[in-house]
Amino acid sequence: MFHQVYVAEPDREALRFLWCPGNDMTQPPVDYAMNVFLFGATCSPSCAAFALRKTAEDNLTGASNHAVQTVFKNFFVDDLLKSCSSVEEASSSVSELCPLLESGGFNLTKFLSNEPGVLSSVPEDDQASAMLDLNWMTSQQRRH
């Protein structure tokens, strides 16, 4: 997520680093500045969260209130955790959130659901690659 958020040009000086071309320590290092936020910088999570919320704010007229409120209330840094009361509501959330966040350069991926019907509305490439089966009880045991 951090690499999807650009650093303002005047602030790039704070994210300077040296790089030895080809990992050859005998060569003089090259001076670079990051154009995007990086994993490990103390400011990256809050800056990325701000950019995500700003994307929702900037699209108040083009997105449903439900989608905007989901961005405000259901994200923790780059993870969305949302419960819905029906497959239709969850699928609708996916179809509203993806374009809203794409307008700010964010691509939602690694979708996971305990309801297969929800995942059928998500492209396979955007689904989580592995899922732990937490259904330890059989359906007969759950009814009792």
Image (cartoon, helix red, strand yellow):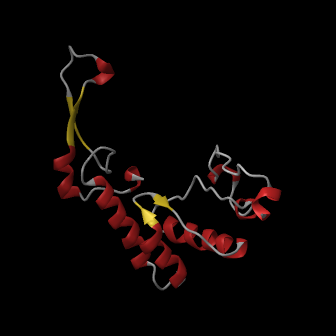
Q: Quadrant of residue 9?
A: bottom left
Q: Which of the image's four quarters has the C terminus?
A: bottom right
Q: Position of residue 104 (x, y in %)?
A: 44, 66
Residue at the (52%, 63%) spot, across then down? 81
- Does 35 appear above or below 63? above
Spot the residue most to the right.
Answer: 140
- 91 lies left or right of 106: right
- 47 lies left or right of 52: left
Residue at the (33%, 66%) spot, across then down? 50
Q: Position of residue 58 (x, y in %)?
A: 40, 78
How many marks the image carries: the answer is 0
- 28 lies left or right of 73: left
Residue at the (44%, 73%) spot, across then down? 73
- Does 91 appear above or below 8? below
Q: Quadrant of residue 22?
A: top left
Q: Position of residue 98 (x, y in %)?
A: 57, 66
Does residue 104 appear in the picture of this structure? no
Residue at the (21%, 51%) spot, across then down? 12
- 106 lies left or right of 22: right
Q: Position of residue 71 (x, y in %)?
A: 46, 71
Does residue 12 appear in the picture of this structure? yes
- Does 7 appear above or below 24? below
Residue 144 or residue 72, whichever sits in front: 144
Q: Quadrant of residue 23?
A: top left
